Image: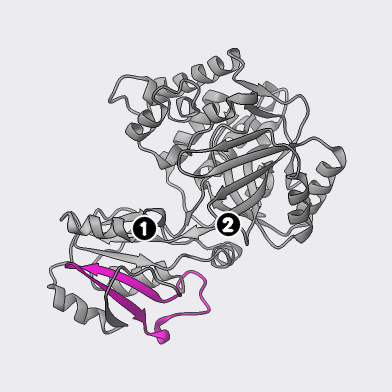
């Protein structure tokens, strides 16, 4: 079984790509999705967030929500907004945001290889979010949210993708968030064979973003495998993915805000910090430029923190992460925040929002302090995955994001 394979993609017809392309389902609230889809009847948000087409207050996990997603997909198909390619293809997908450009491959990734850990994970998943994706896949009989993956050094793949992206694209969408999404179908048999062979030679692929989508696809495959006689084809043995060179992926920091100082005064908190950090007052907002450096916004002032080098366990790929160092030396021992998944005293702010968002959260009075972090490196993520370990919650924020709706994988 190949690591990846081409598939008959479901794509917007011609000029409809811009009307269809939508942000990922999990980066918008219901209210934000409704606002983004207003006046856009073919936005893929009507499929990925179908509660926006039901009465306000509808439970987004209610059965009628998934039924509405299926209805909306059928409507887009019958209106010839979407069509399925006649032959299996790969698709080159380029993301551009300012000076940043990354070029990857849309493919069907093997669930057998995922289950065998050749497609590697680095996060735990939540059952409720997994269940949601399972219901969505089953309702649509399709996978519409691509999993973002990274492949290790493969210069020949990089060269092939760059070459295949020289012609006229099938879709070229400038989204309202400044991201440009460009897609080229790969029909040539020799190019498809070369890409498949190059990926088969790789030791592993790495999930960057989309753990719930891939886990849900595995569950759907296991269920359908047990009832194989019901299905005429076996597309369910693969999941929708976009694979980029690991050195092109851009990770932004995932910053933290905390609601209180656990009863400590500002001075007492700073004094506790000095046991493990060099603490310097900063004249302006701090965006850490190296590992082991942190920004702290507290009581109207910014501070720059440098952890004492002896506290960094360099041989442990999880414990040496900056998100772990902050948790192990500040959040847990000083602030009493031990479970980042469940403690309501901590919240997370994606780096795309900048340090100003941290300062605003504290100045508004809802939070007592904010921490800015240096971004996790892709090499760190891969090292954790290679060890079969998991990273702390909210360790990475990948930017730019993939669009939903430009290529989907039908399971019939």
Query: Residue 200 location, x and y as percent?
Result: 78, 52
Residue drawn at x 78%, y 28% as measured from the top left = 87
Q: Toward which corner of the image does residue 262 lie, by quadrant?
A: bottom left
Q: Secondary structure at mark 2?
A: loop
How crowded is the residue under tag 2: few (<14 C-alpha within 10 Å), some, or many (20+)? many
Q: Secondary structure at mark 1?
A: helix
> Which quadrant would the C terminus be assigned to in this image?
top right
Question: Residue placed farthest to the right in the image?
Answer: 190
Query: Residue 385 location, x and y as percent?
Result: 57, 61
Question: Front-most of 357 and 229?
Answer: 357
Residue 288, above or below 143? below
How crowded is the residue under tag 1: few (<14 C-alpha within 10 Å), some, or many (20+)? some
Query: Residue 150 location, x and y as percent?
Result: 63, 55
Question: Which mark is first along the chain, 1 or 2?
Answer: 2
Residue drawn at x 17%, y 54% as measured from the top left = 364
Query: Residue 111 location, x and y as percent?
Result: 65, 43
Magenta segment boundaries in residue numbering: 290-319
- On residue 354, the disc is 1
Residue 312 belongs to the span the image colors magenta:
yes
Viewer can see residue 132: yes
**Of tags 2 and 1, which is closer to the observer?**
1
Residue underneath mark 2: 249
Question: How far is mark 2 from mark 1, CA to CA?
Answer: 19 Å
Q: Answer whether labels 2 and 1 touch (C-beta < 8 Å).
A: no
Residue drawn at x 81%, y 42% as measured from the top left = 192
């Amino acid at each position: 079984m190949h690591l990846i394979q081409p598939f008959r993609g479901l794509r917007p017809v011609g000029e409809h790509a811009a009307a269809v392309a939508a942000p990922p389902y999990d980066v918008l609230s219901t209210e934000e999705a409704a606002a983004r889809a207003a006046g856009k009847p073919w936005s893929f948000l009507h499929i990925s967030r179908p509660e926006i087409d039901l009465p306000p207050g509808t439970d987004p996990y209610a059965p009628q929500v998934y039924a509405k997603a299926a209805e909306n997909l059928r409507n887009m198909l019958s209106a010839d907004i979407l069509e399925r390619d006649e032959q299996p293809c790969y698709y080159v997908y380029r993301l551009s945001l300012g000076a940043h450009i990354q070029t990857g491959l849309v493919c069907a990734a093997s669930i057998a290889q995922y289950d065998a850990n050749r497609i590697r994970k680095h996060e735990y998943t939540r059952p409720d979010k997994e269940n949601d994706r399972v219901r969505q896949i089953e309702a649509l009989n399709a996978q519409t949210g691509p999993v973002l993956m990274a492949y290790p050094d493969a210069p020949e793949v990089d060269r092939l993708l760059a070459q295949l992206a020289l012609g006229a694209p099938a879709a070229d969408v400038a989204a309202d968030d400044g991201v440009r999404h460009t897609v080229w179908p790969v029909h040539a048999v020799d190019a498809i064979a070369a890409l498949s062979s190059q990926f088969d030679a790789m030791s592993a692929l790495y999930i960057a973003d989309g753990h719930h989508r891939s886990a849900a696809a595995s569950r759907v495959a296991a269920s359908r495998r047990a009832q194989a006689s019901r299905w005429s084809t076996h597309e369910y043995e693969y999941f929708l993915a976009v694979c980029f060179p690991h050195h092109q992926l851009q990770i932004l920091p995932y910053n933290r805000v905390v609601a209180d100082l656990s009863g400590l005064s500002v001075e007492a908190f700073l004094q506790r910090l000095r046991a493990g950090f060099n603490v310097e007052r900063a004249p302006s907002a701090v965006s850490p430029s190296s590992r082991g450096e942190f920004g702290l916004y507290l009581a109207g002032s910014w501070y720059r923190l440098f952890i004492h080098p002896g506290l960094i366990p360099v041989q442990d790929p999880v414990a040496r992460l900056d998100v772990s160092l902050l948790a192990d030396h500040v959040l847990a021992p000083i602030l009493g925040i031990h479970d980042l998944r469940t403690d309501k005293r901590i919240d997370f702010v994606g780096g795309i929002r900048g340090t100003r968002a941290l300062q605003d959260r504290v100045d508004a009075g809802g939070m007592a302090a904010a921490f800015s972090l240096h971004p996790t490196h892709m090499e760190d993520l891969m090292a954790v995955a290679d060890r079969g370990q998991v990273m702390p919650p909210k360790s990475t924020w990948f930017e730019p994001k993939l669009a939903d709706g430009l290529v989907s994988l039908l399971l019939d």
